[in-house]
Amino acid sequence: MQESDNTNIISQGGSRRSGVVPFFLYALLVCSTMIAMPQGGTTYLFQRFVQVVELFAFLFLNIRLLRQYHSLRIDRFQRIVHFWWFVIIISSFITVRPFQLSEVNLWLNVCVFLLMVNVYWEFSGFEHMRMLAVLLSVLVYLNGLLFVMFPDGLWVDTDWIGTGDKARYLFGNYNQTGVVILVSLLVNGIYSIVYHRGRMNMFLIMIVGVATVAAMGSTTSTIGLLIVCLYYIFRRFVRHPYMIVNIFIALYVGFFAMVVWGGSNIDEMPQLAAFVENVLGKDSTFTARVPLWFMSVKLILSQPFLGYGPQNPEWMVQNIGGSGPHNLWLMFMLQGGLLLTGLFVLILLKIFKTLYKARLQSGAFALVCCCVLLLMSLFETYHIVCVFILLTIAYYSKNFDDGEAHPKVTDERGN
C-alpha cells in the first residue's frame, strides 16, 4: 500500500511539474547529441539554434532551481563532473590553436541535462523517465527502420580522414550506434524495473537494437548489448551481481595494464586470444588497434600530467597514425593527462560506490550498463556527451527505489 501511495505521489508530482517544455528540451538535447548530420550550412545553422536554446534553458533552469530550493543544489557527483569539464576546457584553451568553443558547447549540453535532473527528477521521476524512454525508443526504432531502407548508410562522410567505414547512419557510424542503443536500454530498463511498465517495449528494443548493430557489423557493440539484454532477462536469478562487477573490474584493469598500456602479445595467452578472435571477432592486433595504442602510450609518456588538449583527427593522424587511439582511457590521457583521467576515475568510483550502497535491482542493472560501456570503450571512443548522459542516468538511478516488489540484491556475503 505504501509503495502504491508513493507511486501516486510521484505521478501527481510529474503531472504538475512536467510538460511540453521539458520534453522539448530532452528532445533537443538528445537529438542534437545523438543524431549525426553531414557538415554544411544547414547543420551549422541548426547547431547555432540549439546553442541559443540551451543558453536560455541554462538560465531558466538555474532561476527555477534558485526559486525552488534557494540554492543550486550541486552535489558531489555533479561537482566532479563540472571539474572534469573545467579541466578539458582549460586544456583546450592552453594547447589548441586556434582556440575553439567546441568543448564549451559540449559542456553546455551536460550542464542542461544535469540541471534537468536537479529541477525535475526528485519530484517527477516517473514522468521524466517515461519521457526519456519514449524519446529514446522512437530513435532506436527509427534507426532500425532507416537501416532496413538504407543498409549502405544515409550518407557518406567524405571529409572523414580515418581508416574506418565512411558510411553514416542515423547515429553516425556503427560504433556510435551501439552506445546510443545502450543508453536507450539503460533508460527503458530502469523504467520497466522501477515502475513495472514498458516491459514489452524493452524486449522490442533489445531485439531491434542487437539486430541492427549485428547487421551493421559492429561485433563489440553486439556483444556488449547482448550482455545487457541477458542480464535484464535473467536478473532475478543473479544473486550476486556486485561480485560479478568486482570480477569484471579486476579483469578490465588487468587487460588495460597488460595489453593496452603494456603492449603484451595476446598470442601468448591462448584463452584471451580465443576470446578475442572467436567472440569479439578481432585479430591479435585488435584490428590494427595495437599500433595506435603503442603510439598513444609513447606520446602520453612524453607529456603525462596535462596531455595535449582535445586535438582534431588531423593532429591524431600526424602523431599516432590514426584518427584516434580507439580507447577511451588513452583518449583522456592524450587530452588532459593524468589529471583528466583521474577525475573520470573519481566519477566512476562515485557511481559504483553509490549504487553498491543502494543495493537496488535498478542500480545493479545500471552498473551492468556502465560495465558494458567500459568494455566497449576499450576498443572505441564515443561522443563524450553520450557517455556523460549514460553515467548521469546510471548514478541517479539511486533515486528510483524498486520498492517491495523487487527485493534488494545481496552481495557475496549475503548482506
Image (tube, rainbow, N blue to C red):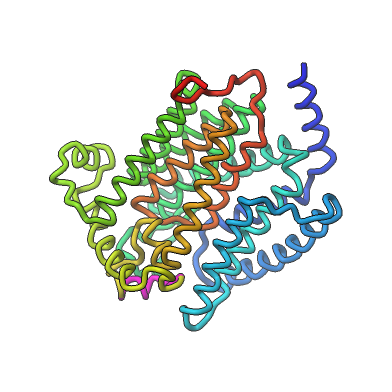
Tell me which corner region of the image, top left, top right, bottom left or bottom right, holds residue 406: top right
**Observer-nearest residue: 17 or 402?**
402
Q: Is residue 315 above or below residue 176?
A: below
324 left or right of 55 in image:
left
Q: Who's the residue at 51% across and 23% down the image?
A: 410
Q: Who's the residue at 24% across and 57% down the image?
A: 290
190 left or right of 301 in image:
right
Q: Is residue 166 above or below residue 221?
A: below
Q: Is residue 338 magenta?
A: no
**Observer-nearest residue: 410 or 128?**
410
The stretch in magenta equals: 310-318
Instruction: Indicate the position of residue 36 as horizontal and vertical percent values.
Output: 51, 59
52 left or right of 378 in image:
right
Indicate the quadrant containing the N terminus: top left, top right, bottom left or bottom right. top right
- Residue at the outermost top position: 1
**Observer-nearest residue: 103 or 282?**
103
Instruction: Indicate the position of residue 269 as horizontal and vertical percent values.
Output: 16, 42
230 left or right of 352 in image:
left
